[in-house]
Amino acid sequence: MTNFELKSYYSSQKINDMNKFLYSNVENVFEESGLADFFTKIEPLQIALAKKTEQLIHNKKIRLEELGSGTDLTRWEIISGLKSSKKWEVILTDFSENTLPDVSKLNKKGNYSFVTKKLNLLDKLIALNPEDKVDVILATYTFDSIWFSEDLHIEKKLNKWFYTIYKLSSLKNIKDINGLAHVKIEKKLIGLDMAKHVFGNLISEYYSHKKNIKINFPGGLISKVEEAFGKQIATNGIFIIGDMAVNNTDGLIPATTAGEDPIYMEDYATSGKVAKFKVEDYGLAKKILETLRYKVELETVEQFIKNSGYKIPLEVKDHWIMIVRR
Ligand SMILES: C[S@@+](CC[C@H](N)C(=O)[O-])C[C@H]1O[C@@H](n2cnc3c(N)ncnc32)[C@H](O)[C@@H]1O
């Protein structure tokens, strides 16, 4: 069991104390409810991911790095079972030995090779030499699980903006994982001057139609994408992100003008195992990344699978795929 101590003070980062503890003990903690496995288990989704990757990466060899991969190898069992004329070099990463998969168990076919590497996303990425750069970085259920220093819970109340900080305190030793009920979470609102906040004008403009709103500002996603393109992604490479987002269609604002994107979320909603940690406001992330001159495709998993040519009988409106390119 990991050493874990709850230091009790207010910070917007406190959520990661619990996160680190929970994931290091993932087998025990998720024993009853089970891990959210949507992104790794659904077969048509893995096929669509492989197809899209091969469409966008024209090299004969595809180097792909997965972030926060976890121990489940179902995705790679499926993808390595597909017929591909390309060579795939896959690097599976996660923050600790406990959360990395055993790739020797993978029943891989000729064109695929797999290695694992420890990579803590709360650290800065290392700058890779051009020959070591990857064509694809893939992260599913990762940005909604990790609380980055740039992430914020922001609230607008009667047209005034605030951000939230948290304090976790524990009456007992947190190592007693069966007793997490004794962990107390307190929250405080601090006034926020949007004019001075990074991307503040964009955020307030984006939500100008609302007097009251609570948002998750996905600052971590935005800065990790920028960092990855600067240090690790090869020219013409892509960053694929799949996460849980808003959980109902009421939150979607349809396009009003021709050519405008049809999918912008208004509010966040909470549901599901993953969303306990964080729900992304993807629409805002897309807008900000576009102002940083990236090309961003954002669609529901249902649409993503349909685009790959597969007729999917299930409705999936609460899981999203974002593909970012230069
Ligand atoms: C919800 S799981 C997702 C697993 C898998 N990618 C999937 O789609 O099901 C979140 C993953 O993020 C990893 N993780 C949590 N904190 C991390 C950190 N600081 N750096 C890297 N990975 C982290 C966890 O170990 C876990 O494998």
Image (cartoon, rainbow, N blue to C red):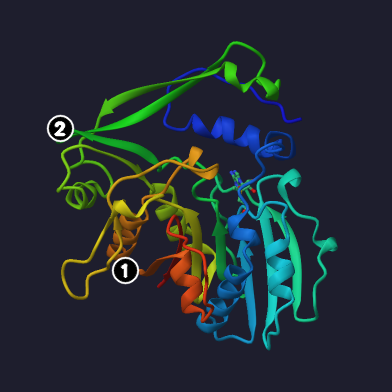
Residue, far front: 313
Residue toward you, 26 or 103: 26
Marks 2 and 1: in contact by CB < 8 Å?
no
Tell me how far mark 1 sits from mark 2, CA to CA: 33 Å
Q: Label 2: which residue?
A: 158
Q: Is residue 191 left or right of residue 183?
A: left
Residue, far top: 171
Q: Quadrant of residue 101?
A: bottom right
Residue at (30, 52) in percent of width and height: 250
Relative image position of residue 238 (x, y in whole percent)? 49, 71
State the SS at label 1.
Answer: loop
Q: For the residue marked with disc 2, what is the amino acid?
A: Leu
The quarter in which the C terminus is drawn is bottom left
Q: Classify 255 as above or below 218.
A: below
State the SS at label 2.
Answer: loop
Residue toward you, 220 or 315: 315
The numbered mark, 1 or 2, whose residue comes first in the sequence reads: 2
Residue at (48, 65) in percent of width and height: 301
The answer to whether any part of residue 154 appears in the image is yes
Q: Is residue 169 left or right of residue 116?
A: left
Q: Residues within 10 Å of mark 1 (few under 14, many from 20)?
A: few
The answer to whether any part of residue 130 appears in the image is no
Residue at (56, 70) in percent of width and height: 136
Relative image position of residue 294 (x, y in whole percent)? 36, 69
Q: For the residue marked with disc 1, what is the amino acid?
A: Arg
Q: Label 1: which residue?
A: 293
Residue at (44, 70) in percent of width and height: 303
Relative image position of residue 27 (x, y in whole percent)? 74, 39
Q: Quadrant of residue 268?
A: top left
